[in-house]
Image (cartoon, helix red, strand yellow):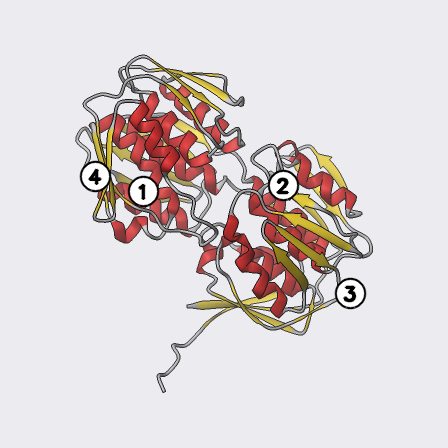
Amino acid sequence: MDRFVVVGGARLAGEVSVTGAKNSVLKLMAASLLAEGTTRLTAVPDILDVAIMSEVLRRLGCTVERGPGSVTIDVPTELSHEADYDLVRRMRASIAVLGPLVARCGQAKVALPGGDAIGSRGLDFHIAGLVKLGAHVESEHGYLIATAPRLTGAQVWLDFPSVGATENLLMAAVLAKGTTTIDNAAREPDIVDLCQFLVAMGASVEGIGTSTLVVEGVERLSPVEHRTLPDRIVAGTWAMAATITRGDIYVRGGRAEHLEIALDKLTMAGALVEPGPDGFRVRMEGRPKAVDVVTLPYPGFPTDLQPMVLALNSVADGTAMVTENVFEARWMFVNELARLGADVRTDGHHAVVRGREVLSGAPVKAHDIRAGAALVLAGLVADGVTEVADVHHIDRGYEGFVDKLVALGADVRREQVEDEQPF
């Protein structure tokens, strides 16, 4: 187990590049199962989750080769239809193979997923949608088992615009017989990227970027080469980092149009945000002002940036309320932030943050990808040294996080933790 050792007092300045989106590339990899032959994805981040999904696909019978910034997936004629627990438990995005396997093989046996400890995130919407498409779905011994000789188009309404359910149902519908309409679909840029990938493969998808997706099923799809869109959450993390450390960062590859509300909040905090030809710049002079935030599905403020805005408000001038409407367990992070001296009180969906001039370095633990990144940013503005444990979570979503921080002027290092001896 490794940890990050963060020395406080750094002002981050310089340029950082954003690679392809984690939340997109994992679903693109799953979607490659829909077409026999060789699919190549570029702008792929070198992160742990890509390695895990690569192994999931290998065990399904694919040949997967990873190169610098790319993944090549050779999908055979005959696929296995079972995704094992030992891999799926490590990453919730593994459930994305459910829809493609049912559509392609007529059956799927996928272990119930693990991943970040940020909420229940049940699979009810996935299951109900597949049943609407004609699948028989049951849960047995820790696995979801879905069968359907061929899926049939249907009208599907999602009670909540779930990203995962939208993606799974979309991938199932492209090979279904007839027309499928997904109402109240998620609209994240990652969904748009997946839709464009499927269309390039030969799928018929209308309403891309809207809350209503209309899919006309086709008999077969063809493999393609596709460039993954930039990661808006990573881009947003660097924007937050510039604001928290009173720094000046140009985020190359970041798309400001995917972060409108988040960047507006940083402007309200006092940052200067300037669009560039291939990214955007965030510059902060002086102490940030406290900003209220409410997380909502896209295009609302992203729940994945909520830990970072808590860290920002913990050193801001004033008091702010942060409301979490997407994942109920994201407040687990608050206890770790409080160890650094942050004044945060939670009540239900709400957290009240009273800003302090400076935090105090302490040992803390990352519970999930984004909380881990936020604790590192908080450590940068803490007095003394902050040790962030369980950084394997951060590895799942951020490529070369320490190297990029150091290049921007941070005093951060990664070190291996020796196993503790028993009493």
Residue ID at (37%, 37%): 124
Which image quadrant: the N terminus? Answer: bottom left
Q: Which mark is residue 65?
A: 1
Q: Visible in this render: residue 356?
A: yes
Residue at image mark 3 = 357
The residues bearing labels 2 and 4 have C-alpha atoms spaced at a distance of 37 Å
Q: Which mark is residue 252?
A: 2
Observer-nearest of 402 and 138: 138
The residues bearing labels 1 and 2 have C-alpha atoms spaced at a distance of 27 Å
Q: Which mark is residue 132?
A: none
Q: Position of residue 165 (x, y in %)?
A: 40, 33
Which amino acid type is shown beneath numbered disc 3?
Glu
Q: Position of residue 185 (x, y in %)?
A: 48, 26
Which amino acid type is shown beneath numbered disc 2?
Arg
Q: Which element is circle 3 on?
A: loop
The residues bearing labels 4 and 1 have C-alpha atoms spaced at a distance of 13 Å
Observer-nearest of 342 and 420: 342
Q: Nearer the viewer, mark 3 or mark 4?
A: 3
Q: Visible in this render: residue 372?
A: no
Observer-nearest of 251 and 383: 383
Q: Residue furthest bottom?
A: 423
Q: Position of residue 119 (x, y in %)?
A: 46, 50
Residue at image mark 4 = 61
The answer to which of marks 1 and 2 sits earlier in the sequence is: 1
Q: Which element is circle 2 on?
A: strand
The answer to which of marks 2 and 3 sits earlier in the sequence is: 2
Which amino acid type is shown beneath numbered disc 4?
Gly
